[in-house]
């Protein structure tokens, strides 16, 4: 599942390829992809120019010059591909945006979980999906003052709480496991047992992991590629995610995989302690 570094990588590769291009034709092949009225989506997007591409946590924001923004969430397997080659379109291509340079921006999604929604750019903060997002790493809002009350009001395990996008946003299963290993916290530690220092460390580690992930072009654990088809290399930097049965890079103890809140969770039973 693409997390913040993967979505940021997609954003950057899309900007380089489609910013400033006019969308001359829109074809929606899988209507459920669109949240809201499909005909209206097609009508409003056709003829508009892509003025910029932003991001909020794991949401791509494709800004149009007509005052609307396409909010795009890739979920499990969504991908954009830019190509003029008709063979780039297959049965998994659910939205096809033809651009004024003859290229097509093709949205592919094998599992069909991704969604797009058209929204007034000026009112993005009112959008239900965006509104509930907590602060994201590397942003001005990602501060101890903002994060502490959001984390401490939960009695649930810290793994589940950090995955909750309303607490903090952008991190998914991979990066939460990495952050908890880095700060030496057992994923089943109740959130309200954390010290101020723990929270401070989580903030620092989250920023570092996101920075590293973006610099590496994301991690290609499953089938993630950016909009030019490149794979990221962050998977080579991971310390615990997917490493069950191998030695902890810090202490040599075997990395374990357990379920926490229903999610596969990787951790070192020696250097990550329950508080
Ligand atoms: Zn260890």
Image (tube, grey):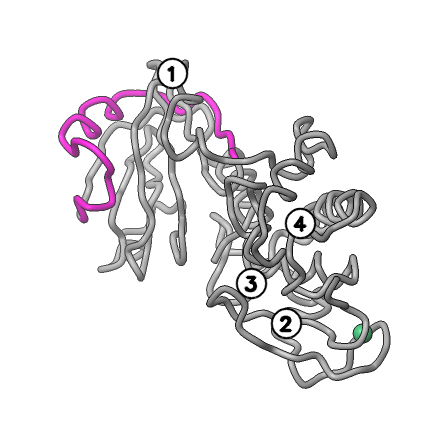
What separation in Å lies between label 2 and label 4 (alpha carbons)?
21 Å
Is label 1 in a helix, a strand or a loop?
A: loop
Mark 1 nearby-residue class (10 Å; few <14, some 14–19, many ≥20) = some
Q: Which residue is mark 3?
A: 220
Q: Quadrant of residue 275?
A: bottom right
User: Foreground residue, 160 or 49?
Assistant: 160
Which mark, residue 27?
none
Q: CA distance from mark 1 to mark 2?
A: 44 Å
Going from the N terminus, do you reach mark 1 or mark 2 first?
Answer: 1
**Depth-wise, is mark 2 or mark 3 nearer the camera?**
2
Residue range (magenta): 30-56
| First reached walking from the N terminus: tag 2 or tag 4 | 4
Residue at mark 3 to residue at mark 1: CA–CA distance: 33 Å
What residue sits right under mark 4 in the picture?
192
Magenta highlight on residue 54: yes
In the image, the residue with mark 3 has its CB under 8 Å from the nearest atom of ligand 1: no
- Label 1 near label 4: C-beta < 8 Å? no
């Amino acid at each position: 599942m693409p997390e913040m570094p993967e979505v940021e990588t997609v954003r950057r590769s899309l900007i380089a390829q489609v910013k400033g291009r006019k969308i001359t034709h829109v074809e929606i092949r899988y209507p459920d992809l669109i949240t809201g009225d499909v005909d209206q989506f097609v009508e409003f997007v056709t003829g508009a120019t892509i003025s910029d591409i932003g991001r909020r946590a794991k949401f791509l924001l494709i800004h149009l010059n007509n005052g609307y923004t396409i909010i795009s969430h890739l979920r499990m397997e969504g991908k954009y591909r830019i190509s003029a080659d008709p063979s780039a379109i297959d049965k998994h291509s659910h939205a096809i945006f033809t651009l004024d340079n003859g290229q097509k921006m093709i949205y592919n999604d094998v599992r069909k979980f991704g969604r797009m929604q058209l929204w007034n750019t000026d009112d993005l903060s009112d959008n239900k999906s965006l509104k509930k997002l907590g602060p994201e790493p590397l942003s001005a809002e990602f501060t101890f003052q903002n994060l502490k009350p959001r984390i401490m009001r939960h009695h649930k395990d810290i793994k589940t709480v950090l995955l909750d996008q309303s607490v903090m946003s952008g991190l998914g299963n991979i990066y939460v496991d990495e952050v908890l290993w880095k700060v030496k916290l057992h994923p089943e530690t109740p959130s309200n047992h954390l010290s101020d220092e723990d929270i401070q460390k989580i903030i620092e580690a989250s920023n570092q992991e996101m920075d590293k992930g973006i610099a590496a072009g994301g991690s290609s654990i499953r089938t993630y590629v950016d909009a030019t088809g490149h794979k990221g290399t962050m998977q080579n930097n991971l310390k615990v995610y997917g490493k069950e049965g191998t030695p902890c890079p810090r202490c040599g103890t075997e990395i374990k995989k357990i379920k926490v809140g229903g999610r596969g969770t990787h951790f070192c039973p020696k250097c990550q302690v329950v508080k």
